[in-house]
Amino acid sequence: MVKNNIEVDVKVKCIETGKTQVQPAEEIGTTSQYVNRIIKKKDRVVNKTFVQMMEKLGYDIDLTYVKRK
């Protein structure tokens, strides 16, 4: 199980960096609509097979974000 709420995490990081969700989407060459679809489904951000494997091994997934220097 992915413990993070990825949608909220993205929104918080956008606020922290003073960007809208549209700006990083455009910077990586995609649309904000596509990014929105991806982040609303946890299994699209973190590969579903990977999540299932980790669950079978007895682990949950907790993503940690580290600001680049």
Image (cartoon, rainbow, N blue to C red):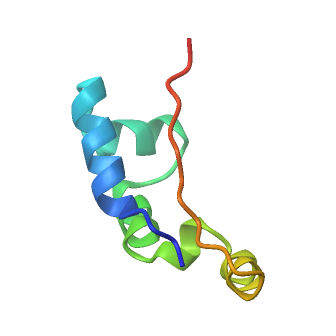
- Does residue 52 lie above or below 29 as drawn? below
- Residue at the image position 44 percent from the left and 77 percent from the top: 41
State the residue lying farthest toward the top.
Answer: 69
Count of numbered labels shown in the rendering: 0
Image quarter of the N terminus: bottom right
Q: Is residue 63 left or right of residue 31?
A: right
Rendering quarter of residue 34: bottom left
- Does residue 2 lie above or below 30 as drawn? below
Image quarter of the C terminus: top right
Q: Please state the horizontal and vertical placement of residue 19, each as a whole percent of the image.
A: 27, 31
Q: Nearer the viewer, residue 24 or 56?
A: 56
Q: Please state the horizontal and vertical placement of residue 22, each as a whole percent of the image.
A: 31, 44
State the residue lying farthest toward the front.
Answer: 58
Q: Is residue 11 left or right of residue 3?
A: left
Rendering quarter of residue 40: bottom left
Q: Please state the horizontal and vertical placement of residue 45, each as a whole percent of the image.
A: 56, 66
- Residue at the image position 66 percent from the left and 74 percent from the top: 59
Q: Please state the horizontal and vertical placement of residue 28, each as a whole percent of the image.
A: 55, 40
- Does residue 63 lie above or below 56 as drawn? above
Rendering quarter of residue 6: bottom left
Q: Nearer the viewer, residue 47 or 51?
A: 51
Q: Is residue 14 left or right of residue 34?
A: left
- Residue at the image position 42 percent from the left and 38 percent from the top: 24
